[in-house]
Amino acid sequence: MQEVLPEGAVIRKLWIGETETYREHVRRLDPQSRRNRFGGSVSDSYIDTYLDFSVAGDAVVHGCFIDGVLRGAAELRPLGPDRSREAEAALSVEQRWQSHGVGSALLSRTLLAARNRGVRRLHMACLADNERMQQLARKFDAELSVEFGSVIGEVATSRPTPLSLMRELLADGHGLAAAMLDLQSRLLRGC
Ligand SMILES: CC(C)(COP(=O)(O)OP(=O)(O)OC[C@H]1O[C@@H](n2cnc3c(N)ncnc32)[C@H](O)[C@@H]1OP(=O)(O)O)[C@@H](O)C(=O)NCCC(=O)NCCS
Protein backbone atom coordinates (compact mmCIF):
# COMPACT_ATOMS: atom_id res chain seq x y z
CA MET A 1 0.00 0.00 0.00
CA GLN A 2 1.35 3.43 -0.99
CA GLU A 3 2.13 5.61 2.05
CA VAL A 4 1.17 9.27 1.75
CA LEU A 5 2.32 11.09 4.85
CA PRO A 6 2.49 14.72 5.95
CA GLU A 7 5.70 16.56 5.03
CA GLY A 8 8.45 16.00 7.59
CA ALA A 9 6.93 12.73 8.85
CA VAL A 10 9.19 9.84 9.81
CA ILE A 11 7.85 6.43 10.85
CA ARG A 12 10.13 4.35 13.02
CA LYS A 13 10.15 2.10 16.04
CA LEU A 14 10.49 3.87 19.37
CA TRP A 15 13.85 3.35 21.00
CA ILE A 16 14.60 2.38 24.60
CA GLY A 17 14.58 5.61 26.58
CA GLU A 18 11.72 7.17 24.61
CA THR A 19 9.02 6.34 27.17
CA GLU A 20 8.63 10.01 28.12
CA THR A 21 8.20 10.95 24.46
CA TYR A 22 5.46 8.32 24.16
CA ARG A 23 3.82 9.47 27.40
CA GLU A 24 3.77 13.10 26.24
CA HIS A 25 2.13 12.07 22.95
CA VAL A 26 -0.60 10.04 24.66
CA ARG A 27 -1.24 12.82 27.19
CA ARG A 28 -1.71 15.30 24.31
CA LEU A 29 -4.62 13.28 22.89
CA ASP A 30 -7.89 15.23 22.99
CA PRO A 31 -10.72 13.77 25.15
CA GLN A 32 -12.49 12.05 22.23
CA SER A 33 -9.29 10.45 20.92
CA ARG A 34 -8.35 9.33 24.44
CA ARG A 35 -11.78 7.75 24.81
CA ASN A 36 -11.37 5.95 21.49
CA ARG A 37 -7.84 4.86 22.30
CA PHE A 38 -8.61 3.47 25.76
CA GLY A 39 -12.28 2.52 25.34
CA GLY A 40 -13.40 5.16 27.86
CA SER A 41 -12.42 8.48 29.40
CA VAL A 42 -9.13 8.18 31.25
CA SER A 43 -7.04 10.52 33.39
CA ASP A 44 -3.37 11.46 33.03
CA SER A 45 -2.52 9.23 36.00
CA TYR A 46 -4.23 6.27 34.32
CA ILE A 47 -2.12 6.95 31.22
CA ASP A 48 1.06 7.09 33.32
CA THR A 49 0.33 3.74 34.96
CA TYR A 50 -0.69 2.16 31.65
CA LEU A 51 2.50 3.31 29.91
CA ASP A 52 4.79 2.14 32.71
CA PHE A 53 3.21 -1.31 32.42
CA SER A 54 3.15 -1.33 28.64
CA VAL A 55 6.71 -0.18 28.02
CA ALA A 56 8.08 -2.54 30.66
CA GLY A 57 6.59 -5.48 28.70
CA ASP A 58 7.40 -6.79 25.23
CA ALA A 59 5.51 -4.14 23.28
CA VAL A 60 6.79 -3.06 19.86
CA VAL A 61 5.84 0.58 19.41
CA HIS A 62 6.04 2.33 16.06
CA GLY A 63 5.89 6.10 16.12
CA CYS A 64 5.21 8.80 13.58
CA PHE A 65 7.42 11.81 14.20
CA ILE A 66 6.46 15.03 12.47
CA ASP A 67 9.14 17.70 12.59
CA GLY A 68 10.76 15.70 15.36
CA VAL A 69 7.65 15.45 17.59
CA LEU A 70 5.85 12.14 18.17
CA ARG A 71 2.34 12.68 16.78
CA GLY A 72 1.15 9.11 16.30
CA ALA A 73 1.93 5.69 17.75
CA ALA A 74 0.95 2.07 17.23
CA GLU A 75 1.54 -0.47 19.94
CA LEU A 76 1.81 -4.20 19.34
CA ARG A 77 1.63 -6.18 22.58
CA PRO A 78 1.75 -9.98 22.92
CA LEU A 79 -1.25 -11.47 24.69
CA GLY A 80 -1.25 -14.59 26.84
CA PRO A 81 1.49 -17.24 26.94
CA ASP A 82 4.31 -17.22 24.35
CA ARG A 83 2.80 -19.92 22.18
CA SER A 84 -0.65 -18.39 21.95
CA ARG A 85 0.49 -16.29 18.96
CA GLU A 86 -2.01 -13.63 19.83
CA ALA A 87 -1.34 -9.95 20.19
CA GLU A 88 -3.15 -6.71 20.66
CA ALA A 89 -2.65 -3.57 18.61
CA ALA A 90 -3.67 -0.05 19.57
CA LEU A 91 -3.21 3.18 17.66
CA SER A 92 -3.23 6.84 18.56
CA VAL A 93 -2.87 9.87 16.33
CA GLU A 94 -3.16 13.42 17.67
CA GLN A 95 -6.25 15.20 16.37
CA ARG A 96 -4.40 17.79 14.26
CA TRP A 97 -2.72 14.93 12.36
CA GLN A 98 -5.68 12.60 11.89
CA SER A 99 -6.91 11.87 8.35
CA HIS A 100 -3.43 12.50 6.91
CA GLY A 101 -2.47 8.87 6.39
CA VAL A 102 -0.56 8.48 9.66
CA GLY A 103 -2.85 5.75 11.07
CA SER A 104 -2.65 3.80 7.80
CA ALA A 105 1.16 3.91 7.77
CA LEU A 106 1.36 2.88 11.43
CA LEU A 107 -1.09 0.00 11.01
CA SER A 108 0.82 -1.25 7.98
CA ARG A 109 4.08 -1.39 10.00
CA THR A 110 2.31 -3.02 12.92
CA LEU A 111 0.84 -5.74 10.71
CA LEU A 112 4.28 -6.45 9.28
CA ALA A 113 5.82 -6.63 12.77
CA ALA A 114 2.98 -8.92 13.92
CA ARG A 115 3.48 -11.24 10.97
CA ASN A 116 7.24 -11.38 11.53
CA ARG A 117 6.64 -12.36 15.17
CA GLY A 118 4.40 -15.24 14.18
CA VAL A 119 1.21 -13.56 15.42
CA ARG A 120 -1.88 -15.29 14.06
CA ARG A 121 -4.60 -13.32 15.79
CA LEU A 122 -4.32 -9.62 16.21
CA HIS A 123 -6.95 -8.07 18.46
CA MET A 124 -7.85 -4.44 18.20
CA ALA A 125 -10.44 -3.10 20.62
CA CYS A 126 -12.58 -0.50 18.93
CA LEU A 127 -15.69 1.31 20.18
CA ALA A 128 -18.77 0.78 18.02
CA ASP A 129 -18.98 4.51 17.17
CA ASN A 130 -15.32 4.78 16.12
CA GLU A 131 -15.96 5.18 12.38
CA ARG A 132 -12.46 6.27 11.55
CA MET A 133 -10.81 3.20 13.07
CA GLN A 134 -13.32 0.92 11.39
CA GLN A 135 -12.65 2.58 8.03
CA LEU A 136 -8.93 2.21 8.63
CA ALA A 137 -9.27 -1.50 9.43
CA ARG A 138 -11.36 -2.01 6.26
CA LYS A 139 -8.50 -0.60 4.19
CA PHE A 140 -6.44 -3.56 5.33
CA ASP A 141 -9.09 -6.18 4.70
CA ALA A 142 -6.62 -8.17 2.59
CA GLU A 143 -4.49 -8.66 5.70
CA LEU A 144 -7.12 -8.46 8.40
CA SER A 145 -10.43 -10.21 8.59
CA VAL A 146 -12.56 -7.51 10.06
CA GLU A 147 -15.24 -8.26 12.56
CA PHE A 148 -16.71 -5.32 14.44
CA GLY A 149 -17.91 -5.43 17.98
CA SER A 150 -15.27 -5.31 20.60
CA VAL A 151 -12.60 -6.89 18.45
CA ILE A 152 -11.23 -6.35 14.99
CA GLY A 153 -9.08 -8.61 13.06
CA GLU A 154 -7.06 -11.63 12.43
CA VAL A 155 -3.70 -11.55 10.70
CA ALA A 156 -4.29 -13.59 7.58
CA THR A 157 -0.69 -14.54 6.82
CA SER A 158 0.51 -16.67 9.66
CA ARG A 159 4.13 -17.22 8.68
CA PRO A 160 6.92 -14.72 8.25
CA THR A 161 8.88 -15.04 5.00
CA PRO A 162 12.43 -13.91 4.20
CA LEU A 163 10.85 -11.06 2.24
CA SER A 164 8.63 -9.90 5.11
CA LEU A 165 11.62 -10.02 7.50
CA MET A 166 13.68 -8.05 4.98
CA ARG A 167 10.91 -5.45 4.66
CA GLU A 168 10.96 -4.88 8.42
CA LEU A 169 14.78 -4.66 8.49
CA LEU A 170 14.78 -2.19 5.62
CA ALA A 171 12.06 -0.11 7.28
CA ASP A 172 14.11 -0.05 10.52
CA GLY A 173 17.23 1.04 8.64
CA HIS A 174 15.28 3.69 6.75
CA GLY A 175 13.68 4.94 10.00
CA LEU A 176 17.08 5.28 11.66
CA ALA A 177 18.61 7.11 8.69
CA ALA A 178 15.59 9.43 8.39
CA ALA A 179 15.70 10.21 12.14
CA MET A 180 19.40 11.11 11.89
CA LEU A 181 18.84 13.33 8.85
CA ASP A 182 15.86 14.98 10.52
CA LEU A 183 17.88 15.69 13.66
CA GLN A 184 20.76 17.08 11.63
CA SER A 185 18.56 19.39 9.56
CA ARG A 186 16.76 20.67 12.69
CA LEU A 187 20.12 21.33 14.37
CA LEU A 188 21.24 23.28 11.29
CA ARG A 189 17.99 25.30 11.34
CA GLY A 190 18.55 25.92 15.06
CA CYS A 191 15.25 24.44 16.26
C1 LIG B 1 -8.22 5.84 14.36
C2 LIG B 1 -6.93 6.53 13.99
C3 LIG B 1 -5.75 5.73 14.51
C4 LIG B 1 -6.85 6.64 12.46
O1 LIG B 1 -5.67 7.32 12.13
P1 LIG B 1 -5.68 8.41 10.96
O2 LIG B 1 -4.28 8.91 10.84
O3 LIG B 1 -6.73 9.40 11.24
O4 LIG B 1 -6.07 7.49 9.73
P2 LIG B 1 -5.77 7.74 8.18
O5 LIG B 1 -5.58 9.19 7.89
O6 LIG B 1 -4.69 6.81 7.79
O7 LIG B 1 -7.14 7.33 7.55
C5 LIG B 1 -7.52 5.98 7.51
C6 LIG B 1 -8.87 5.85 6.88
O8 LIG B 1 -9.86 6.31 7.78
C7 LIG B 1 -10.92 6.90 7.04
N1 LIG B 1 -11.11 8.24 7.54
C8 LIG B 1 -10.26 9.29 7.56
N2 LIG B 1 -10.84 10.35 8.13
C9 LIG B 1 -12.09 9.97 8.48
C10 LIG B 1 -13.15 10.62 9.14
N3 LIG B 1 -13.07 11.89 9.50
N4 LIG B 1 -14.28 9.89 9.38
C11 LIG B 1 -14.38 8.59 9.02
N5 LIG B 1 -13.37 7.92 8.39
C12 LIG B 1 -12.24 8.62 8.14
C13 LIG B 1 -10.55 6.87 5.59
O9 LIG B 1 -11.08 5.71 4.99
C14 LIG B 1 -9.06 6.73 5.65
O10 LIG B 1 -8.52 6.10 4.55
P3 LIG B 1 -8.31 6.93 3.16
O11 LIG B 1 -7.74 8.25 3.52
O12 LIG B 1 -7.38 6.08 2.37
O13 LIG B 1 -9.68 7.03 2.58
C15 LIG B 1 -6.87 7.98 14.56
O14 LIG B 1 -7.94 8.71 14.06
C16 LIG B 1 -6.86 8.03 16.09
O15 LIG B 1 -5.82 7.96 16.69
N6 LIG B 1 -8.03 8.14 16.71
C17 LIG B 1 -8.10 8.21 18.17
C18 LIG B 1 -7.66 6.91 18.86
C19 LIG B 1 -8.34 5.71 18.27
O16 LIG B 1 -9.46 5.76 17.82
N7 LIG B 1 -7.63 4.59 18.27
C20 LIG B 1 -8.17 3.35 17.74
C21 LIG B 1 -8.51 2.38 18.80
S1 LIG B 1 -7.11 1.49 19.28
Image (cartoon, grey):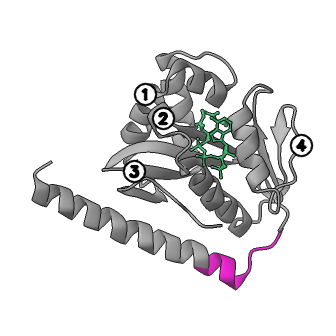
Check disc 1 and give the amino acid type: Arg
Instruction: Name the residue beneath numbered marker 1.
Output: 28
What residue appears at the point 84 percent right and 32 percent down from the top-left corner?
150
Disc 2 to disc 3, C-alpha distance = 11 Å
Disc 2 to disc 4, C-alpha distance = 25 Å
Give the class, few, some or many, for how many residues have Cα within 10 Å of label 1's Cα (few <14, many ≥20).
some
Confirm whether residue 134 shows in the render: yes
Q: Secondary structure at mark 4?
A: loop
What residue appears at the point 57 percent right and 24 percent down from the top-left corner?
34
Q: Which region shows up in magenta?
A: 158-166
Instruction: Name the residue beneath numbered marker 3.
Output: 65
Mark identifier at residue 179? none
x and y percent of residue 27 in the render?
45, 26
Label 1 beta carbon within 8 A of ligand 1: no
Task: Tell which of 105 and 19 is nearer to you.
Answer: 105
Mark identifier at residue 147? 4
What residue appears at the point 87 percent right and 53 percent down from the top-left corner?
145
- Choose the circle earlier in sequence order: 2 or 3: 3
Decide: marks 2, 3 in contact (CB < 8 A)? no
